Image (spheres, rainbow, N blue to C red):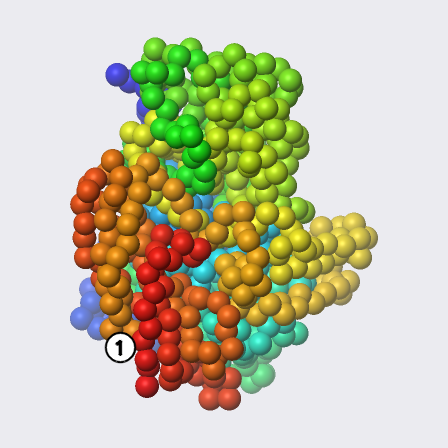
Amino acid sequence: MIKAHQVLLASTLLLCLRAHAQRSAATSAPDPRRPWMNTALGPDQRADLVVQQLTLAEKIQLVHGIGWGPLRAGAPVPSDNNGGAGQILGVPRLGIPSLQEADSAVGIRMAAPESRYATLLPSVLGAAASWDTESAHLYGDVIGRELRAEGYNQSIGGGVDLARDPRNGRLFEYPGEDPVLAGYTVGNVIRGVQDNRILGDIKHYAFNDQETGRTVVDVHLSHKAAHESDLLAFELGIRIGHPASVMCSYNKYDGDWTCENDWLLNHVLKGQWKYPGFVVSDWEATHSTVKAAKAGLDIQMPGEEYFGKPLEQAVEAGTVPQARLDDMVHRLLRSMFAAGVIDHPPTPRTVVDPFKGREDAQHIAEESIVLLKNSRAVLPLNSASVHTIAVIGAHADVGVMSGGGSAQVDAPGGNAISPGQPTQWGSAVYFPSAPLQYIREHAPGARVQFDAGTDPAQAAALAKASDVAIVFADQYMSEGGDAPTLALPGQQDALIAAVAAANPRTVVVLVTGNPVAMPWVGQVAGVVEAWYPGIGGGQAIANLLFGTVNFSAKLPITFAKSEADLPHTRIFGMDYQAVNGGLPEHWVSEAKKVSFPADYSEGVRFGYKWFDSEGKQPLFPFGFGLSYTSYTYGALAVDSALGSATFTLTNSGKCAGTEIAQVYVQLPSASGERFRRLAGWQRVPLEPGESKTVTVSLERLAWASYNESKDGWEWLAGRYTVSVGGSSRDLPLRAEALVR
Ligand code: BGC
């Protein structure tokens, strides 16, 4: 049976084919007579051979972008431009191609203007909720293979900023609050991208943990806390993913913008971590020539204000050493050789496979959607016994919401709630994956009715007349702003409360960028967090609600009851726009920019570490998620070097499922820490009644301490407590390990 979405995708595919037939795909084959084309040499040697050939003008051209290009109307666009957010001109006489960069946090951005199609994946936060490094790799693979098919050679996704504040507008682009889970997730996404011979990226380095005043906020945090939190996520992501580039962020750290911060770039990234790739500025995050070049910034994007003529003059004057310019160029070229884009340049002669993309996106969604509450066994819905279903709210009759900003993917056929209308930065785009349609497919014998949810009384009346009510609620989030509070936007809390009062069998499905408060949680029977579930979202939600697929995901972020329980009840700089005459901070001229401090006095204690050490009760804890079966843990043994934890895990329920077993480590009392740290986990598939012995390897840096006076990691001697279980607040197994 051909489904509606397949027809839509097929027509999109046709469009793509036509567009590509018109495009000239000519790319010359690599010339073997060029010594740097000898693939027996390593990327550094090959890069050096090219650097020797380059003129000063060519070197300068390689360390900045072409300007705003297709991002801004009227900006010049080179003839070979591929339509992405950034381009660095190549050196054709030496066979060095242009770098064609595409934003691709959750799928490729800006595909539609070129008549192309790109798969919308679930939020990165959702991918982290799967705790599945293979799924994370698949996530990157979808992005990498589609970039290649569309003629791009670099992804500028890879966000790994930690969820220090659950109101951060870009949390859907980031993998949650724990540095180890975040680093492993993003590292594997980058692997997936780069396995397609595409340059990968990790961003925004570092501490871009809020959007409010993002270009001026000055983050204060000790070096120790920085290493053990935000920087650890980057360190692990880089160790696992070997990204070609690191994008420095808009904000300041300790008084210096991160793109000219010697400590962050030269000392930590290139020094301590020996990072060989290039540092690229976020778009207009470069603020100087000499200072930035000397501090370790390699490439200015998107234009050349600082790294064009001014850098050339600085090199000629000797204020930026020639060797430093050569190093900048070397880093770019070695990354291009290492990724394989010089030996195997992508040519836009193929089209993406939207069906495969949708299948992969749906698989990731099914692993990422979390069941938070299921009382009186309201779920799974039984299609044989449910006769009437009310589906309410959030445009669930047409599709699912997606996140905005530079992570916005174009919806096939346009915004599902306003087809044919141009989409605007800042307004929500829905993708054609309608939960209503798939709920109907699962319950062909039932009467499934939809109510838009705009009138709570009317929605409640439909709910009252139905066996079960499924209320969809959503929250639009986008780069450039944070959620002012944890509340669901608009009247959705009132809608849910009204429906729950009318029908005790009410299930809430949240399609949100961020965690939200749930004042109605005690009144509803079920709660599902679907994040932004991507192009396969409608099917994934329906499959999980009806139990065709069992829930396995667990929260990668704490859900707080209210702002009062957070380390900071208000986001820093909420009044900042007023300071700048009401202008959005991005457009305030350099001279007039006013900085404000964000004093992250909580250090590493945010998310579950905050709730645990403060003895606060979260709404739903980190690591939590229900399924349609239950699991029993037993017999923990920990090796004395804290390399692994071994235990038994049994599926004690009646259906097959996959448990995410988590291992937490608490440091010896001398550390002064009063919280546990996630050190390892494993997804364990189990048939009903099946038992397995599980060995989880523990990440060494998860239980390391950063010693500021030695400026390095150390592992404290003493007694560590290892706890194992199904969430950060449900740890039935405990053992001690004495580390000498
Ligand atoms: C964002 C980056 C993005 C860049 C290019 C910036 O506003 O912060 O994440 O890659 O724009 O679109």
Which residue lies most toward the bottom here?
710
Q: Which residue is drawn at 43% across and 13% down?
A: 388
Q: Nearer the viewer, residue 46 or 240?
A: 240
On the question of residue 41 being in view, the answer is: yes
Q: Which of 221 and 351 is in front in this view?
A: 221
Quadrant of the image occupied by residue 384 = top left
Tally of numbered discs: 1
Q: In this view, does 145 lie to the left or right of 408?
A: left
Q: Is residue 317 left or right of residue 364?
A: right
Q: Residue at x 40, y 12 (%)?
A: 387
- Would you place residue 269 above or below residue 717 in this image? above
> SS class of the residue under badge 1?
loop
The percent coordinates of residue 690 (x first, y second) are 18, 45
Q: In this view, does 314 lie to the left or right of 178?
A: right
Q: Mark 1 points at which residue?
A: 640
The percent coordinates of residue 692 (x first, y second) are 18, 53
The percent coordinates of residue 564 (x first, y second) are 66, 53
Q: Which amino acid does label 1 sit on?
A: Ser
Which quadrant, please, contains the C terminus? Answer: bottom left
- Would you place residue 649 above or below residue 404 in this image? below
Q: Residue at x 53, y 43 (%)?
A: 513
On the question of residue 342 being in view, the answer is: no
Q: Which residue is drawn at 42% across and 78% down?
A: 668
- Would you place residue 278 above or below residue 198 in this image? below
Q: Nearer the viewer, residue 457 or 708?
A: 457
Q: Which of 363 and 516 is in front in this view?
A: 516
Which quadrant, please, contains the N terminus? Answer: top left
Give neighbour class at mark 1: few <14, some 14-19, many 20+ (Cα, 10 Å): some
